[in-house]
């Protein structure tokens, strides 16, 4: 139909959206967008304006509210300009108020004869008690007191307290807070969500401030439970949805590739390796996608377990992709897997960002045709341009080192229509049990809890930096015996150049100290080819000492290396130190790890390094790390998904977590709409992050 010229134009210029005020923008930045977000933004503490304290009972340092009549109000100029007001309460006791900044309006409210209610913290002054910059307001004798405690929210210069209070007040009255949970879900004795929030925003005068502030109050318990439940529901739902997806059932055939691989290995599997390999094989044989984490201490032998899983998949006619977070690590895997799998007739392709041009085209062709049964590389393996003939299994090593975004991307990429590939993740950083239940409920876990035989535990020694010469003498002894040595310098993120200088200086020093040995240097800014060359000289045994930044942190495997020196050990996290230390002690030789530190150490610094010397158990170290750094840190990148628990505390709220875990399945099965609404209320659009 032709446009009707007389009609109103349908395309009006779009009305400009009203500009947002600074406080609005500040709120958005804090994620305070929906009414429910604001309603769930809780006070840090409270002020008690529900009563007036006689001035005679006010004590220095204790915040109180007093009321009195202004007897004197004057501007003094010494030692600097200030407004000094004297008030007297009904009992005849006096208090001085002092304002270093003031406006005429203040003077007006605080004029002689006015009755004022004043809040602040008195301190001992020259003429008795005084308050500096108290808050105050004009009152009459019958002005009512606040009925509830006054909330104090986390605020900022851009987001003033008064603005926030008003915004939350309004949002709380509008927010849809109807009870969603059927009876029997919430632990007995806890209030409804609406009641709980009402108490938390405006506690009645009788409420226990201590219980409110230490979060043991029933209102807090309800909130924590709600939050934990949302997380459990979201995780269990993801699990449930995944169970509906279909994957190729990859059955390990008798006499198949995986048995041939086992027979060809130069060692026999440990009991733990056998067990986890079977757990994985069982998952692979099912027609639903596996979603399993393989955790095992550094050196526990996860790679061969991955190779066995790959052999099963390839034998069944499907392809396998193995991804590592760094090129060096990927290359280590590549060599090892080529050595194991090519003799069995399996094609192994190599794909990273630095494979370019013709070589890349050739690799892509091998992957697309299915000629490559296994593709090893960095996350370049899942780029859009990579087409598999049919991908049956994806293995991700050190999966926690991939960022949240990368992990989400991986899932999206793999989650194409039709059959999903199975997913195996590997990590040397064990997840503590409570964290596993909260954040990784959607994940099956296999644990290798045994090291291959014949390993001598690494002995860890602490040396202050001024004993560097002794350390270098040790290196000389070690290389004289044909052994190899790592020297690790810290990665200083703020200053890559400083980091580099540190490594190059150490490199030069060691070159000079060991003139007849090959001493190499490896750092993150070297071109990939140079890195690979240095690594292969070291792996081949021609290079005696390798000075490296933390690029060697994960997965490098040179069994002849028996001494590891870590410079500025105090700058590393415990788990990182443990990973690094795991680079030695891989052969039969007794190995030593020297933690070189710069004195003086802080007391916690000392404790941490001592912990490293005391234990070589990665699970114990992870536990201590969690203790020192808290779960937020432990989760690393995950916290950037802002999906961390805001209210619940895993250390304290175990009982609530258990209850949430217990009721979640029934809620999902019998009240799916309520479950969905609950997840939406608590997580909004954030569920995705929980799945990463
Ligand atoms: P990680 O679990 O840290 O990835 P790797 O898979 O790199 O450990 O294994 C560490 C070393 O132990 C490798 O050299 C590997 O070949 C060897 N290894 C693995 N399993 C066994 C075993 N059962 N017996 C002896 N050596 C093994
Ligand atoms: Mg490994």
Image: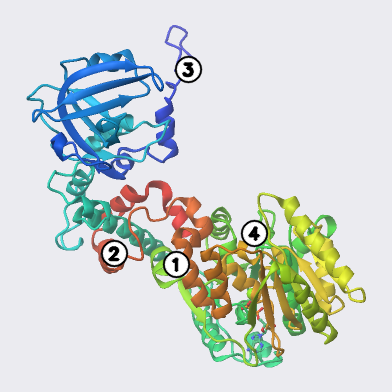
Write down the residue under mark 2.
664
Write down the residue under mark 3.
11
Write down the residue under mark 1.
627
Say whether disc 2 or disc 4 marks the residue closer to the N-terminus.
4
Q: Nearer the viewer, mark 1 or mark 4?
A: 1
- Badge 1 vs badge 3, beta-carbon distance below 8 Å: no
- Label 1 and label 4: CA atoms lie apart by 36 Å
Secondary structure category for the residue under label 4: helix
Say whether disc 2 or disc 1 marks the residue closer to the N-terminus.
1
Of residues 636 and 494, which is closer to you in this image? 494
Image coordinates of residue 208 in percent, x first then y, are: 17, 51
Image coordinates of residue 685 in percent, x first then y, are: 41, 47
Secondary structure category for the residue under label 2: helix
Establish if 205 lies above or below 111: below
**530 relative position to 189: left or right:** right
Say whether disc 1 or disc 4 marks the residue closer to the N-terminus.
4
Of residues 681 and 522, which is closer to you in this image? 522
Secondary structure category for the residue under label 1: helix
- Can residue 371 be seen here? no
């Amino acid at each position: 139909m032709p446009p009707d010229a007389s009609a109103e134009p349908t395309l009006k210029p779009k009305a400009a959206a009203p500009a947002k005020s600074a406080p609005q923008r500040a709120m958005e930045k804090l994620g305070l967008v929906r009414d429910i977000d604001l309603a769930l933004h809780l006070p840090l503490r409270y002020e008690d304006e529900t009563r007036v304290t006689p001035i005679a009972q006010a004590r220095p340092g204790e915040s109180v509210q007093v009321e009195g009549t202004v007897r004197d109000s004057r501007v003094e100029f010494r030692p600097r300009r200030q407004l000094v007001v004297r008030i007297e309460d009904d009992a005849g006791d006096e208090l001085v108020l002092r304002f270093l900044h003031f406006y005429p309006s203040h003077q007006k409210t605080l004029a002689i004869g006015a009755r004022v209610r004043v809040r602040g913290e008195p301190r001992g002054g020259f003429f008795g008690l005084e308050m500096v910059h108290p808050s105050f307001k004009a009152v009459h004798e019958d002005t009512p007191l606040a009925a509830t405690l006054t909330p104090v929210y986390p605020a900022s210069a851009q987001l003033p307290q008064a603005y926030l209070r008003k915004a939350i007040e309004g949002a709380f009255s509008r927010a849809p807070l109807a009870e969603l949970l059927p009876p029997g879900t919430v632990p007995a004795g806890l209030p409804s969500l609406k009641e709980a929030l009402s108490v938390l925003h405006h506690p009645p005068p009788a409420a226990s401030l201590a219980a409110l502030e230490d979060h043991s109050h029933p209102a807090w318990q309800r909130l924590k439970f709600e939050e934990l439940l949302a997380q459990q529901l979201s995780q269990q739902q993801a699990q449930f949805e995944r169970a509906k997806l279909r994957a190729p059932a990859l059955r390990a055939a008798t006499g198949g590739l995986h048995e041939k691989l086992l027979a060809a290995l130069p060692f026999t599997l440990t009991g733990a390796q056998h067990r986890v390999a079977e757990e994985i094989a069982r998952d692979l044989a099912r027609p639903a996608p596996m979603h399993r984490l393989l955790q095992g201490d550094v050196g526990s032998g996860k790679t061969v377990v991955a190779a066995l899983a790959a052999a099963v998949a390839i034998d069944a006619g499907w392809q396998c992709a193995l991804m590592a977070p760094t090129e060096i690590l990927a290359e280590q895997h590549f060599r090892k897997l080529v050595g194991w799998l090519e003799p069995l007739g399996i094609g192994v392709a190599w794909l990273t960002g630095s494979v370019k041009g013709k070589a890349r085209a050739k690799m892509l062709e091998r992957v697309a045709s299915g000629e490559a049964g296994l593709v090893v590389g960095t996350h370049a393996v899942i780029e859009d341009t990579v087409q598999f003939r049919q991908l049956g299994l994806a293995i991700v090593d050190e999966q926690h080192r991939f960022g949240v975004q990368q992990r989400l991307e991986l899932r999206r990429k793999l989650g194409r229509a039709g059959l999903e590939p199975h997913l195996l993740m590997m990590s040397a950083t064990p997840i503590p049990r409570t964290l596993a239940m909260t954040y990784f409920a959607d994940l099956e876990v296999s644990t290798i809890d045994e090291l291959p035989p014949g390993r001598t535990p690494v002995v860890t020694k602490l040396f202050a930096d001024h004993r560097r010469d002794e350390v270098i003498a040790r290196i000389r002894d070690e290389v004289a015996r044909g052994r190899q040595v790592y020297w690790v310098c810290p990665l200083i993120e703020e200053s890559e150049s400083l980091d580099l200088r540190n490594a190059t200086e150490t490199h030069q020093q060691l070159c000079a100290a060991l003139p007849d040995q090959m001493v190499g240097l490896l750092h993150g800014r070297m071109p990939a080819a140079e890195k690979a060359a240095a690594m292969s000289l070291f792996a081949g045994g021609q290079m005696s000492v390798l000075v490296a930044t933390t690029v060697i942190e994960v997965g490098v495997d040179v069994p002849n290396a028996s001494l590891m020196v870590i410079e500025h050990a105090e700058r590393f996290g415990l788990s990182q130190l443990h990973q690094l230390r795991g680079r030695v002690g891989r052969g039969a030789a007794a190995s030593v790890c020297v933690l070189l530190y710069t004195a003086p150490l802080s007391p916690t610094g000392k404790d941490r390094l001592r912990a490293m010397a005391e234990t070589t158990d990665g699970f114990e170290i992870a536990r201590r790390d969690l203790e020192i750094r808290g779960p937020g840190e432990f989760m690393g990148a995950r916290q950037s998904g802002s999906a961390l628990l805001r209210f619940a505390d895993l250390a304290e709220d175990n009982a609530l977590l258990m209850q949430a875990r217990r009721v979640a399945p029934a809620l999902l099965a019998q009240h799916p709409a309520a479950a969905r609404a609950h997840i939406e209320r608590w997580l909004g659009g954030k569920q995705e992050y929980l799945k990463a």
